[in-house]
Amino acid sequence: MSTQDWATLSNQAVAAATVVFALGCLAHLAEWAFGRRVDAAAPVPEPAMVAADGVVTQRSPATPRPAAGPDRSDLLGRAGLSLTVLAFLLLLGGVSARGLAAQRVPWGNMYEFATTGLLVATGVYLVLVRVAGVQWLGPIITGFCVVVLGLAFLVYVPAGPLVPALHSYWLVLHVSAAAIAGGAFAVGAGASAVYLVKSRAEQRTSLDARRGYLWRLPSSAAMDRLAYRVHAFAFPVWTFAALIAGPIWAQYAWGRYWGWDPKEVWAFITWVVYAGYLHARATAGWRGRTAAMLALVGFATFLFNFVGINLFGSGLHSYAGV
């Protein structure tokens, strides 16, 4: 196949992945909408029996309802997960074909970094589904992928060679580490966002009124721990990308380690916010809503660095275009 054929195949695969992600998101949203309280967790009180002589016989306080088969919510959740796996494979094919079309690693501009970052985010999510049962993150991850892929098409550029400054193995090390960290940050932000919803509901809803899909999710404390662990994985990867590989590559390309370039500054701001989040969790014992909001602030700084600086700023990183 020619490079143009690979480029066409890449575009078709990414477009198909966007559609499948959207279908997966709809399936997960329907799962949430049709979700109901786990039957076994809702005991049904047994009425007292009155004999003919007037003696009252009290049965056991409560008898659990019999376990039901897979309900509509379960089936929709499985469909959403299957669609997410299919979308991941399509996106993997699209990113790989883009690399073959460009004859280089496929993360040399904003479009390519977005598709690669989403590939990592989806992969992290699917691994966590396997090992930690976090399928409840499905609508957040798939919805995020649909939005970002839609925006990525707006900054699409044809596959082509890179400028000489990018012809370095540091491109592979620096940008791939940033993509891995960004994908993990996205999953951590999704967990933090759902945590905020669940924790508020736990505070405002009485025990006997806790019905619906929200109450089939893990406790807010479990969500908080998951978000912390994902961020704890992503932070050292981001440290390597932003504070080690990036400065070394800057010295190689521009003759200095630090030059107050906008992307350098915002990469450091992102690092400071996440460092504060992890430090506060480890030393000050921060838990709950404050920590979750700080994690979301960190992800917002990451997105601003990726989107805002690329589109509206200028600096030494501008040579890669969007």
Image: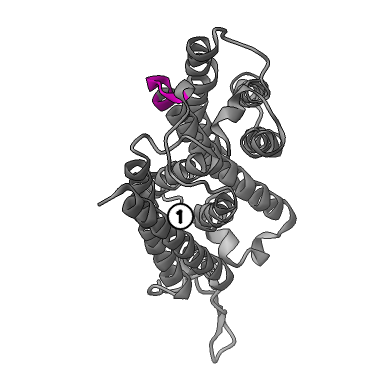
- Kindly identify the residue that appears in the image at 55 percent across and 53 percent down: 153
Above or below — where is 49 with respect to 136? Answer: below
- Give the residue type at disc 1: Gln
- Kindly identify the residue that appears in the image at 62 percent across and 18 percent down: 283
Above or below — where is 55 with respect to 27? Answer: below
- Kindly identify the residue that appears in the image at 42 percent across and 55 percent down: 11
Name the image quarter holding residue 147.
bottom right
Q: On the image, numbered disc 1 is attached to which residue? A: 135
Q: Nearer the viewer, residue 162 or 266?
A: 162
Q: Position of residue 300 (x, y in %)?
A: 67, 38
Above or below — where is 316 with respect to 135? Answer: above
| Label 1 Cα crowd, 10 Å radius (few <14 / some 14-19 / many 20+) | some
Q: Is any part of residue 105 visible from this angle?
A: yes
Q: Position of residue 151 (x, y in %)?
A: 60, 52
Q: Nearer the viewer, residue 209 or 215?
A: 215
Q: Is any part of residue 90 visible from this angle?
A: no
Which residue extends farthest left? 1
Left or right: where 83 falls relative to 302: left
Secondary structure beneath disc 1? helix
Stretch of the chain drawn in magenta = 166-172
Name the image quarter holding residue 9.
bottom left
Q: Position of residue 223 (x, y in %)?
A: 55, 44
Provide the major secondary structure of the magenta segment.
helix
Q: Position of residue 282 (x, y in %)?
A: 59, 21
